[in-house]
Structures are given as C-alpha cells and as structure tokens.
Amino acid sequence: MTVESEVSLPSVNGGRLPGLLVRPESGTPGPAIVMIYEIFGMTGEMRRIAREFARDGYTVLIPDLFARGQVRPLCIAATVTTMATGRGAALGDCESARRWLADQPTVDRDRIGVMGFCMGGGFAMLLSRTGLYRVAVPFYGRAGVAVEPVCPVVASFGERDAQFADGYPQRLGADLEERGIPHDVVVYPGAGHSFMTRTPGVTGALARRSPLHAEYHEPSATDATERVRAFLHDHL
C-alpha cells in the first residue's frame, strides 16, 4: 500500500513549489527518489510510475517544475532551456525538492536517487554530476551540455529514437566504464522515445509518426523496469 499527497515545498528561488509525494505506508526511513517528469508534465503516467516505485518501498517526490509563474508555455520553455544549457532556476527547484525530501520521516537522507523521463532524463544526467545523489536513472534523456556522472547510472534508450542515432548511449556507457562507475546502459531494439509511457489522443498520434517514434513499447518498458529495480536494490 502507498500514501499519496499533493505537497508544497520552499524553493531556493523564492516562493513555494507544488509537487506530488508518493510513499510506502510504512513510516520506516528508507530510500527515496526525486523524479523529474517528461515534457508533458504531471501526467497520469508519471503518477503511475511513481506509485509503482513507491510500492517497491521508495518514497517518490515529483516536483512540478512547470508550475512556476502564471504563463505555462514560458515556464516549460525556461525549464527546457535549463536542461539544454545546464543553467537556470529549474535546477534550483530540483535541489529544493531533494532537500525537502531528505527531511521527510520516511526518507533516509543518505539514500536518495534521481530519476527522469525525456526532458527529465536530461535533468537526471545534469544532477548525476553533483555528488548529491546515490544513483541516477535517466530514461531516453540527455543534457545539452557535456556531463560526467559521479554516481552509478542505469539508463535506457530506444533504438528507433532519432535523437540518439549519434551513438550517445554507447558513448555514455564507454565513459562510465572507463571511469569505473557502476552502470547499466541499454538500447532497446524496436523501441522509440517515451517507451515507458502512453500518450493519448492527437499528441500521441503525432509523436508516433515523428522521427522519435515515441510510443509505449511494453517489452522494453517491462525489461527496463526490472533492470532499474535490480540496480536500485544494489546501489540505493
């Protein structure tokens, strides 16, 4: 069983930031995950994945990075720019989320990881270099700047995703191997972008027909989830 609540946390950028907290019913301190959502924001699919990991015993916090300011498209653009450049307020909001999560009674503050999807995967990579997280879990994401993770990384990509046709996943794995950092980097044949989530309606139809071939791919999603569970068990 899990407990789910909408929360409000103070931000280092000023004001407060909303978020979703999903935790195990048990109050015993344990591992936790800061989860950074995909470009579509706080969707039902992001909530579903948070619940799945909470059922595994992780306290999961999704900070709502798109909630800052009154003009949502501008918030989205600013957040994506931060992911692309490695600079911006969204990184401060991520750090605010980590600090707030570390103070929760169900969290062992020394056992916090970061997970991200799509845009959030880029943030997971940016945060992997800070030394503040025990593990990073990027799904089909990359930062717009060079990143050298200093924590273990379990990363998953789709072979049909055009944005990774340049060999980025292979270079990531080679870099981690060379520097002796525990890692598990897999590129799934037959999968494209966003293979972990279902995007409905016209948006989903357009995404499937894009060069990203973005759509849910059950075999890849199932295997990636099991790989991540095993990696988190060993490293978080």
Image (cartoon, grey):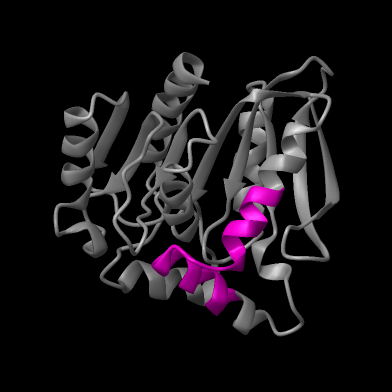
- Assign the N terminus to one quadrant of the image: top right
Image position of 92 with respect to 95: above or below: below
- Can residue 196 be seen in this snapshot? no
* Residue at image location 31% in from the left, 73% down from the top: 210
- In front here: 199 or 76? 76
- In front here: 110 or 45? 110
* Residue at image location 39% in from the left, 50% down from the top: 195
**Residue 89 pos. (x, y %):** 61, 67
- Asked where in the image residue 215 lies, by quadrant, the reply is bottom left
Q: How many marks?
A: 0
- Asked where in the image residue 228 lies, by quadrant, the reply is top left
- Can residue 60 be seen in this snapshot? yes
**Residue 155 pos. (x, y %):** 35, 39
**Would you say 54 lies left or right of 207 here?**
right
Residue 89 painted magenta = yes
Magenta highlight range: 76-96
**Residue 90 pos. (x, y %):** 60, 63
Image position of 215 with respect to 149: above or below: below
* Residue at image location 30% in from the left, 65% down from the top: 212
**Residue 13 pos. (x, y %):** 72, 64
Q: Main secondary structure of the magenta part?
A: helix
